[in-house]
Amino acid sequence: MVRTLFHHWLRGLPIVVFAACTSVAAYAADPPAAKPAEPPISHRVLPEGKLPDDARLGPLRNIDSYFPLSPPASREEWERRAERVRRQVLVATGLWPMPTKTPANAVVHGRVDRDGYTVDKVYFESFPGHFVSGSLYRPKGHSGQKLPGILSPYGHWEKGRFSEASVKEFRKQIVEGAERFEDSGRYPLQARCVQLARMGCIVFQYDMEGMADSQQIPVGVAHYLKKRRPEMDTPELWGLFSVQAELHLQNIMGIQTYNSIRALDWLLTLPDVDPERIAVTGESGGGTQTYMLAAIDPRVKVAVPAVMVSTAMQGGCTCENCCYLRVGTGNIELAALIAPRPLCCLAADDWTHEIMTKGLPELEKVYGLYGAEKDVTAKALLQFPHNYNYVSREVMYQWINKYFKLGLEEPVIEEDFKPLTVAEMTVWDKEHPRPPGGPQHERALLQWMTDDSAKQMAALTPHGIDEAAKKQAAEWRRLVGGAIDVMVGRELPPSGAVSFDTVRSAERDGYMEFAGMIRYVEKREELPTLILAPINNRTNHVAIWLDADGRRGFIRPQARQRRG
Ligand SMILES: [Zn+2]
């Protein structure tokens, strides 16, 4: 009945003053009574101690929360969802709009000749003055043919691309059946590149930020920053993990993701790479880079992320997390964005160990919407801890052989090889000097991103009302509206989906007061609200009062002043 009363009132009197709570703290307390002598006036919407039934007030999630995927019923529904999640990934990683692609200025040098393949040293600029470094493995004896191109990012190895297992560690792996060969087994990062090259693929293994030849942003900043850096956290010129960087959506995960995109750009400039046969495979942090690239870049045709796709731990490093990325989504859904392109998720006795029952069935349902259930698989090798060892790599080789139609007899067996030394791999030498890095470089890189983004947005700002301006306006809405949608958490609710339910109404001194709840039932959101409406004055004006103190700040501003 009170609800009817308010709506009747609203129709007759379109002058409403509107006060809304904006903080959880404000829900809990009533403002004190106006004067001790008068009976207390309660502006409370809910009984004391009761919080609104609002999904946003639930426990905060972290990387160790549970991240299941609920597959939608139809392909249309999934594709709408996929567009939204893909956009979320791009916004979160600062790639919305995508940075302006500048010349890569790639340098390839220092070829090493091996049994059945060669290895070149490669570096190029992903951003102006910011370099991606890596090793390019090429098969011999395939001249004139188009060959599959494979990107191979890697995870948090102490020496990155230059890693070698200690003799003790390696012997343990031989005993456990995790590795097979005396020489090559100590170099698992090289092993997968060599084998894929021997299978007839062109493989580019590129450095994680802060590892091997990539030293412009040190590892202690890119992955292991423990303390805030006040000198890098200023409003004028800032570094990563600063207030300004976060506000500008500039993060190490975005830089690594963009490095992957630029690595693929460069790989596709090679005349013998077949653009229809592009794969990406990496483990751990490299598994994160694998599904991230494949999720947003349709040029990737096959993906094999190792030991990272699961409903459990989502990535333990700063390079695997950024604001907005996993709000309402998680690694299983991010991997599902690869559908219907072939996807093989490798798992081990780590946070991925439940993939066969939690993750794979849901991925199969999404692939099923395309009739492609058979193009997604997972392999849980639970006899091994977190790894991308010989046994796991074998699964990947079969997957690549099958989907790139290499025609090799199965099982494809990895063979021994002569490992590369650090001197044979490092891209920097006297003729190719290491580029400058450190805080100045980091600030300049983020400044370039800020300027580039501002330029792109300025160019889109519509002027005038002609056809060109209309197009600009549409693009502006797509970009800015699309980003706001992600940052707010969802689109504006449709008209009629939000209701105001009056709990209590009262006539005050010259105005009516309605206490009630604004509800968006579909998203389980509730906002305790006071609506104050003058009784006699009809001006058609509405004021919405949002206050950090909620209703308390509106009704008794002096209470806030006293707090100083
Ligand atoms: Zn990292």
Image (cartoon, helix red, strand yellow):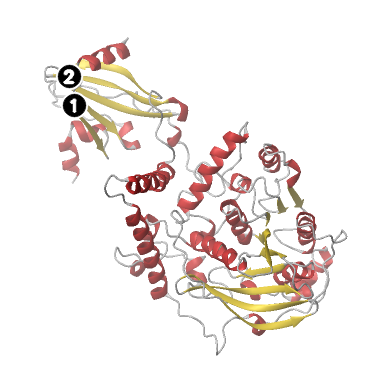
Badge 2 is on which residue? Answer: 39
- Residue at 28% x, 44% y: name it: 465
311 versus 406 height, above or below: above
499 versus 304 height, above or below: above
Q: Is residue 311 visible?
A: no
Horizontally, residue 171 falls left or right of residue 202, namely right
Q: Is residue 66 visible?
A: yes
Disc nearer the start of the sequence (1/2): 1
Badge 1 is on which residue? Answer: 33
Question: Which sits in the foreground, 30 or 523?
Answer: 523
Name the residue at the top extreme: 1
In x, y percent, where is residue 449?
40, 64
Question: Which sits in the foreground, 236 or 51?
Answer: 236
Horizontally, residue 230 falls left or right of residue 147, namely left
Q: Tell whether label 2 touches label 1 (CB within 8 Å).
A: yes
Name the residue at the bottom extreme: 430
Q: Amino acid at mark 2?
A: Pro
Quarter of the image with the N terminus is top left
CA gap, disc 1 to disc 2?
Answer: 8 Å
Horizontally, residue 163 falls left or right of residue 260, namely right
SS of the residue under disc 2: loop
- Residue at 52% x, 75% y: name it: 105
Question: Which sits in the foreground, 91 or 75?
Answer: 75
SS of the residue under disc 1: loop
